[in-house]
Structures are given as structure tokens and as C-alpha cells.
Amino acid sequence: MTILDMIIEHKKAILPKLKESKPQWDIPLKKRPSLYDALRKSDTLQIIAEMKRASPSKGIINENADPVKQAKRYAQAGAACISVLTEEKFFKGSFEDLASIANHVDTPILNKDFIIDKAQIDYALHAGASVILLIVAALDDETLSELYEYAISLGLEVLVEVHSEEELKRALCLHPKLIGVNNRDLKTFQVDLAQTEKLSETINRIDDIAFISESGIFETVDAERVAKAGARGILVGESLMRSGNVEETLKSFQIKLPPLRM
Ligand SMILES: O=P(O)(O)OC[C@@H](O)[C@@H](O)c1c[nH]c2ccccc12
């Protein structure tokens, strides 16, 4: 059983409880800017900065970080979007974190979780997210497209995450606007930025898509490498959560990009 299987099993087990208790927040989908627009229009690499206390591959990263302080630091340093992990058991996140961040920052907000059911999308919406993540590796085609359409119908943006060519092919059937290549294989934890390069050939052939490279980005050279492959944005967690100077670390990734062909 892979770690991804374990997380999904756990999600299924707690789903009935989630469905019983309705979301207790009602942070309206305020007029947050579109992540897609930020990625398409900007001439610098856009940073999606993540609030991440722990992970199954790294254990504790920064358990006691104050989510609002961290998110405000990200926003002030120029992050295009704040990503908030809400998975509790393996990542020590919560919808509380998401709601409190949503109450204090105006950037787009990505709910980072393992979504397998519409009820989780309702939670994301009520807790203040404007973008949700759908992980292709965790879903069959039918559920993937059902959840995708549902989120879009609610006015949310959807980041569709892939790791392999095969997953990319499945993702592209949705005609997604936001595609993320996770450099980390969620089944083995192996991280390799070459994954972004590999999948970029296909992604770069599609007009109108905003391409994000996710995970394993620590240095300016890493950002330069994925930008060269065509990424307009990067999703960064660990290096920002461990940084003694968030502003400096974040700014070290804001490199110049070639203009997009329109
Ligand atoms: O901490 P990193 O290596 O910078 O990675 C951030 C982000 O990409 C990672 O947290 C992530 C990407 N996709 C996910 C899916 C579920 C949980 C977590 C993730």
C-alpha cells in the first residue's frame, strides 16, 4: 500500500463525519483575484506559498508556525497565492487554518487537500478558498470530471495535479486552465525536477494553460530550471516554512520570465 493509498483510505473513513457536521465558517468567496490571470499576465515567476506544518515524507517541518502571520509574510513578500494544507492526520493542517488565513489575506487561496468528494469542496468554499486542488493520481476519470465540474460551477478555480505522462493525458481531457506538475511522486516520495521538464513538452503545446511546477524547489537555480521548462508559477512549502527570512527566500524565486505567446 502506498502512502497515497493510506491517505485516501483515511479520507474515506472520515468522510461520513465530515458530511454530518456542516462547515462552521461562512467566509464569502470574496473578490479574490484569479490565480490564472496572475500566472498568465505576470512577467515574473509567480509563487504559490504554502502553509505546511508537517508532511509524511519530511515529518515535522514547522509545527508551531502561526498560520496568519506566515500567510501575511507571504503576501507581503509578493506571493501570488497562499496554499493552505487542511489535511489533519498526515500534514497537521486544518480548515481552521484555512479560514483564519482567508480572513486576513486578500490573495487567491488554494485549499491543499486530498479531495475525493463534493463535501470537501463545500468545506473549501465555506472556509474561504478560491482555488482547490484535484490530484489525478487519487481519482478515477469519472470522479475527477464530476469534482472538476462541481468546483467550477461554484466559481472556484481548480488546479489539476499530475505527476506522470499518463496522468497528464487524463488531466487534459478536462481542458483545465491550471495544471500543476508535482515533482514529488506521491507513491514513493521521490522528488525530481526533471518531471517538470519531461511533461513540459506536452503542456507547452497547449495555449491558454497556466503551468505550475510543484514541490522540491529550494534554490534560485531550481526556480530557474522549471521556469526554463515553461512554468509560470511554482508551489513552495518546505523551504519557506523553514526559512529564517521568508521575504528573502520568496524573493529569491521571483525571476524574470520570457513573455507568453498570446
Ligand atoms: O514542501 P515542498 O517540497 O516545497 O512542496 C510543496 C507542495 O508542492 C506539496 O506540499 C504538495 C504538492 N502536491 C501535494 C498534494 C498533497 C499534499 C501536498 C502536496
Image (cartoon, grey):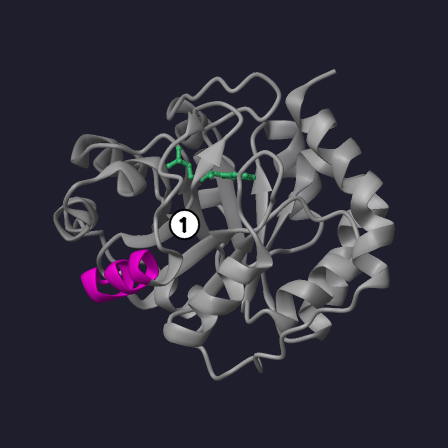
Q: Where 158 falls versus 115 (above or below)?
A: below
Label 1 sits on what residue type?
Met
Magenta part of the protein: which range? 69-78
* Residue 32 coordinates in the image, percent (x, y): 45, 78
Compare residues 8 and 144 and report the one nearer the observer: 8
Q: Main secondary structure of the magenta part?
A: helix
* Residue 22 coordinates in the image, percent (x, y): 78, 69
The residue sitting at 39% across, 49% down in the picture is 50
Instruction: Residue 227: tell me if it is visible.
Output: no
Residue under numbered circle 1: 51
Question: Quick one: SS at disc 1?
Answer: strand
Q: Where 245 falls versus 8 (above or below)?
A: below
Disc 1 residue: CB within 8 Å of ligand 1: no
Count of numbered labels shown in the rendering: 1
The residue sitting at 39% across, 29% down in the picture is 197
The residue sitting at 53% across, 38% down in the picture is 91
Answer whether residue 259 is magenta in the image: no
- The residue most toward the front is 64
Quarter of the image holding residue 218?
top left
The residue sitting at 49% across, 38% down in the picture is 181
Instruction: Residue 204: tell me if it is visible.
Output: yes
Label 1 crowd bin: few (<14), some (14–19), many (20+), radius 10 Å: many
* Residue 25 coordinates in the image, percent (x, y): 63, 74
Quarter of the image holding residue 154?
bottom right
Compare residues 131 and 169 and report the one nearer the observer: 131
